[in-house]
Amino acid sequence: MVSYALGLDYGSDSVRALLVNTATGEEVASSVVNYPRWAKGLYCEPAADQFRQHPLDYLESLEQVLADLWRQAPDGAAQSVVGISFDTTGSTPVAVDNDGVALALKPEFAENPNAMFVLWKDHTAVKEAAEFTAAANRSEPNYLKYEGGIYSSEWYWSKALHVMRADSAVKDAVHMWVEHCDWMTAVLTGTTHPDAFRMSRCAAGHKVMWHESWGGFPANEFFAGVDPILDGLVERLPTETFTADQKVGELTAEWAQKLGLPAGIPVGFSAFDCHMGAVAANVQPGVLTKVMGTSTCDITIASAEAIGDTCVRGICGQVDGSVIPGMIGLEAGQSAFGDLYAWFKKLVNGPAVAIIEQSDVLDDASKQKLLAELDDKALIELSAAAQAIPAGKSGVTALDWVNGRRTPDADQTVAGAISGLKMGSGAAEVFRALVEATAFGARAIIERFRAEGVAVESVVAIGGISKKSDFVMQTCADVWNCPIDVLDSDQSCALGAAIFAATVGGAHPDVASAQKVMGSKVCKTYEPNGEAAKVYDGLYRHYQALGQFAEGDKS
């Protein structure tokens, strides 16, 4: 009998559903649905680094994406699903009340951004992150030793503290904070109530300061010492965490009816999107998996014996079992990758967009056609023009910190910069410098891993950019001076979730067995160009120098 695994991937803009044959690895059907409120820019203030998402976007989109999936899938496929698993962005927490209800689902908080999910890219909590870092450096043990030594404004506790300071109504109503990935599994299994709620190892270990060596989370006194507003909050969290090959519970009858699935299907513990993407990429020691989208997330693994007592500085944590059970998962990444290209596209397209929108000559249909064409083709034309410029000949150097810096050494107060501009510098020269900047930022991560004793011998790339831009990928191969394998699957993170779903559902005895059948194949390899790599060695030093100047001048 044919059986299927269902992987659900919640990204920044949309949810993706992927149905995979557990015996062959065939991706039978997939669907994508954009979040409607997010698409309208609701509850966000980009100028203030505020990015919030309403829980109804997640719930409504889940029903829609599965309804569409079943229209594409073979007849009766829903009845043959053996397991469900989620991945989401993170850290993306939400405040819940004493009954485990997300506050924004209650009438009195329905339009309050502080009661909604605080998206990973929300950087409103820079001050709070610095306070946690300072407190950890004073404590014994240092509760950040396994999280890179620096707490980020992108992470759970910073966001919780910032919102509770900013909004007394939320502070008074909140019982605990829940990561998006854990909330989804709790909703589907009916375990949202704090008495039943359980947490995934991935989210807790990388963003919430969980570690087995200190019995779970830091002591309450640590948090109360940062701010009394946090007193008692950590004590409401479960101290045990679970890897993604384990079962949270079964799909409830209510959600089975909504999603067109049989009740009782096993639902696995969740993880962050990049971690499950790495599983689809057959991650292994010495190979860095890079999820390349609006931002990037870099994942590799190592054995406990290989890591030993090393606490890798400046990354987003090292957690036992966060990627593959029994291995140490290591995470890094860049706060902007595709976002930097999108920013530049918006910048150069801005005047033309305004002219088209304000035109009295064009009708509405013509306007929409022109705007769509401008949006679709701008980066294609920029890439073609930039690719024609030889490495080292643009004369422009840029930083990729337009959304702060995630790693190495998290600092969301830094900003992007461009140097070397002259009268002859055009859009193509600047765009090439921005592409090179994202590659240089990734190289800094690779070099930090290597300096700390973590091997990086090759890179596997997944995500939209890896499949869309030969120019970007070849530039990365040259800057990193190592081969890059691009995976065939267009939904690698959802595929990783499906691999765990197949394991939880009993179609395979363990993750490794599921990977052998269901893992994605390589569709293309980029080899570095030796001459260009030499040029980029010199340009990388310019990038580092510009970074040092920008950090020194950020005040």
Image: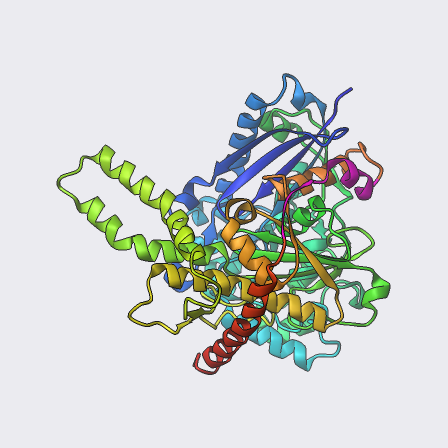
Above or below for 59 versus 315: above
Pick the quarter of the image with the N terminus: top right
Above or below for 251 versus 218: above
Pick the quarter of the image with the C terminus: bottom left
Q: Residue at x 63, y 16 (%)?
A: 75
Q: Residue at x 47, y 81 (%)?
A: 549
- Residue 209 percent location from the top left of the image: 69, 65
- Residue 17 percent location from the top left of the image: 59, 35
Is 520 displayed left or right of 113 in the figure? right
- Foreground pick, 45 / 421: 421
Residue 19 belongs to magenta span:
no
Q: How is the image coloured?
A: rainbow
Q: Is residue 51 visible?
A: yes
Is 427 displayed left or right of 304 in the figure? left
- Residue 463 percent location from the top left of the image: 57, 47
Residue 520 belongs to magenta span:
yes
- Foreground pick, 460 / 315: 460
Which span is picked out in magenta?
510-526
| Image quadrant where residue 139 sits | bottom right
- Foreground pick, 394 / 178: 394
Point out the residue furthest to the top here: 75
Is 12 displayed left or right of 244 in the figure? left
Above or below for 23 versus 388: above
Q: Is residue 407 visible?
A: no
- Residue 197 percent location from the top left of the image: 69, 48
